[in-house]
C-alpha cells in the first residue's frame, strides 16, 4: 500500500516537473528558431543529430495547412499538434507530451516541442525505484537501530530474569543485582523482600521438622512397644483390637517418617546413586513381599524417594496387597520407576480420574485423591523434573514415577 502511494505521489510530482522542463525547452527552441527564418519557412529537417532527439523533438507547423515546415532530425513527419495549445497536452496517439508556442514574426506558424511517453515513463520509474530503494534502506537501518536500542533497553530486564531464576533465598549472595535502573528498583526490592520472607519461613519449617523428628519418633516407638507387650499379656478376645491398634500406630509412624523425610530434604533434590534393594530393606515393610531386581540403582534424592516409596507401600498394604514388584527402566532420556502390587486395584474410570488429578495437580478437597500416597509420589517425581503416571494393569495397582535421567543444567 505504501509503495502504491509513493508511486502515485512521486509520479504526479515528476509529471509536473517534466511538464515544466518541457515549457522551458520550448522557450529555448523558440528563441533559437525565431532568429533563423529559414527554419521557420523552409520545408526541411535539421541535418545535425543530437542524442537528446531520441526523446525530445521539435516541429514548426503551418497553422493554416497543418503541414510540418521544419523539424528536428528525429521528429515525426506528421504534425504532433495541428493547432496551438495554451498548455502541455498529450498528442492524439498519446505517445508524445507536447507544448506549443507561436512565432510573433510568423503568426501563421507555431512551434511544437514534444517529449516521448517512453522517456517520461523511464524517468518516472527510475525516480520511484530509487526513492523506494532509499526508503527501504532507511527503513532497514531504522529497524536495525531500533532493534539494537530495544535490546539495550531490555538487557537489564533479561539480566534480572536470569538472576531471579538462580536466586536462592537461603543464599544471600544470589540476590538479584541488575544494573541501576529506576524502573527496576521496585521489582528488585520486592523480590529481595519476598526472598527474605521465604528464607525465614524455610528456616522456621526446617527447625520445626528437626524438632518434630525427635519429639514424635520416640512417643510413637514407645506406643508400639507398649502395644506389643499388651498383645502378649491380653486375653484372646482383646488381642485383635490391640493388633489393629498396633498396625495403625505403625502406619502412623511410617506416614510421619515419610513427611519428615520430605520436608527435611530441602527444596532442590540432592541426587545420589541409590541401591533400591538397600533402600527397600531400610523401610522395614516386613508384612509385604517386596521384589526388586538385583543391582537396581537409581539417581534420585534418597530422602524424597524413601518418602514416596513409604507411602506407596503403605497404600498397597491398606488395599490388601501381599506382593509388590519394584522395577526400574529407561525410556529415551527418562528414568522410570514402576511400583506394582497385587491388591484390590481400581476401576478404569477411577484410574482415569486419578490420572487427571495428578496431571493438573488437583490435590485438594473434592478431587479424586483420597490419601497422601499418590500426592507425595507425584510431588517427589515433580521435584526431580518429572511426573507420576498410572498405566493400565491387568490386576492390582500400578504407578510409574518418571523423571529425566540426567539433571538439566541451570
Image (cartoon, rainbow, N blue to C red):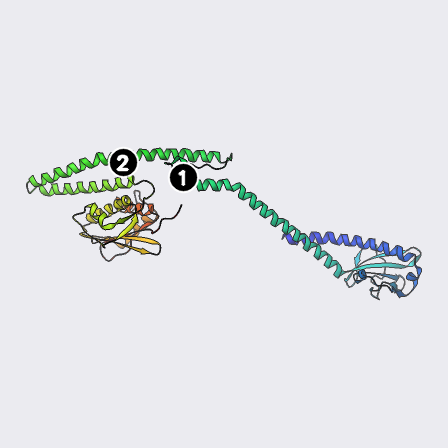
Q: Which residue is mark 2?
A: 209
Q: Classify residue 190 as left or right of residue 244.
A: right
Vertical position of residue 363 compared to residue 23: above or below: above
Q: Which is more toward the observer, 356 or 310?
A: 310
Few, some or many C-alpha atoms within 10 Å of disc 2 (few <14, some 14-19, many ≥20)? some
Q: Which residue is mark 1?
A: 167
Could you tell which of marks 1 and 2 lies nearer the N-terminus? 1
Q: Residue at x 89, y 54 (%)?
A: 31
Distance of label 1 from label 2 (alpha carbons): 24 Å
Q: Classify residue 89 as left or right of residue 388.
A: right
Q: Residue at x 70, y 51 (%)?
A: 9
Residue at the limit of the structure toward the bottom, as seen here: 77
Q: What secondary structure is found at the residue carrying circle 1?
A: loop
Relative image position of residue 69 (x, y in whole percent): 89, 64
Relative image position of residue 301 (x, y in whole percent): 30, 45
Relative image position of residue 13 (x, y in whole percent): 73, 51
Amino acid at each position: 500500500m505504501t509503495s502504491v502511494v509513493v508511486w502515485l505521489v512521486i509520479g504526479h510530482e515528476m509529471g509536473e516537473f517534466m511538464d515544466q522542463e518541457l515549457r522551458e525547452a520550448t522557450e529555448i527552441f523558440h528563441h533559437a528558431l525565431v532568429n533563423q527564418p529559414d527554419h521557420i519557412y523552409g520545408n526541411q529537417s535539421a541535418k545535425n543529430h543530437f542524442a537528446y532527439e531520441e526523446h525530445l523533438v521539435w516541429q514548426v507547423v503551418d497553422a493554416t495547412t497543418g503541414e510540418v515546415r521544419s523539424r528536428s532530425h528525429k521528429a515525426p513527419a506528421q504534425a504532433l499538434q495541428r493547432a496551438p495549445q495554451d498548455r502541455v497536452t498529450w498528442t492524439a496517439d498519446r505517445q508524445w507530451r507536447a507544448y506549443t508556442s507561436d512565432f510573433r514574426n510568423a503568426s501563421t506558424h507555431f512551434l511544437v516541442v514534444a517529449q516521448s511517453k517512453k522517456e517520461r515513463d523511464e524517468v518516472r520509474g527510475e525516480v520511484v525505484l530509487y526513492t523506494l530503494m532509499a526508503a527501504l534502506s532507511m527503513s532497514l537501518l531504522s529497524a536495525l537501530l531500533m532493534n539494537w536500542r530495544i535490546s539495550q533497553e531490555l538487557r537489564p530486564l533479561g539480566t534480572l530474569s536470569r538472576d531471579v531464576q538462580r536466586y536462592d533465598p537461603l543464599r544471600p549472595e544470589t540476590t538479584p543485582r541488575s544494573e541501576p535502573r529506576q524502573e527496576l528498583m521496585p521489582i528488585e526490592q520486592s523480590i529481595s523482600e519476598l526472598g527474605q520472607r521465604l528464607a525465614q519461613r524455610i528456616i522456621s519449617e526446617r527447625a520445626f521438622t528437626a524438632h518434630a523428628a525427635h519429639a514424635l519418633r520416640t512417643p510413637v516407638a514407645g506406643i508400639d512397644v507398649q502395644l506389643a507387650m499388651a498383645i502378649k499379656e491380653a486375653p484372646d478376645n482383646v488381642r485383635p483390637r490391640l493388633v489393629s491398634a498396633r498396625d495403625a500406630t505403625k502406619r502412623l509412624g511410617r506416614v510421619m517418617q515419610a513427611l519428615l523425610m520430605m520436608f527435611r530434604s530441602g527444596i532442590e533434590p540432592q541426587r545420589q546413586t541409590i541401591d533400591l534393594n538397600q533402600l527397600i530393606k531400610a523401610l522395614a515393610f516386613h508384612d509385604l513381599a517386596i521384589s526388586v531386581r538385583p543391582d537396581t540403582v537409581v539417581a534420585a534424592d534418597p530422602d524424597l524417594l524413601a518418602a514416596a516409596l513409604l507411602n506407596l507401600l503403605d497404600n498397597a498394604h491398606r488395599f490388601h496387597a501381599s506382593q509388590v514388584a519394584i522395577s526400574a527402566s529407561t525410556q529415551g532420556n527418562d528414568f522410570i520407576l514402576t511400583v506394582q502390587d497385587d491388591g484390590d486395584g481400581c476401576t478404569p474410570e477411577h484410574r482415569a480420574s486419578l490420572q487427571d488429578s495428578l496431571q493438573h495437580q488437583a490435590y485438594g478437597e473434592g478431587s479424586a485423591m483420597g490419601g497422601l500416597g499418590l500426592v507425595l509420589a507425584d510431588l517427589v517425581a515433580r521435584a526431580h523434573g518429572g511426573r507420576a503416571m498410572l498405566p493400565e494393569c491387568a490386576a492390582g495397582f500400578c504407578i510409574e514415577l518418571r523423571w529425566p535421567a540426567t539433571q538439566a543444567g541451570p
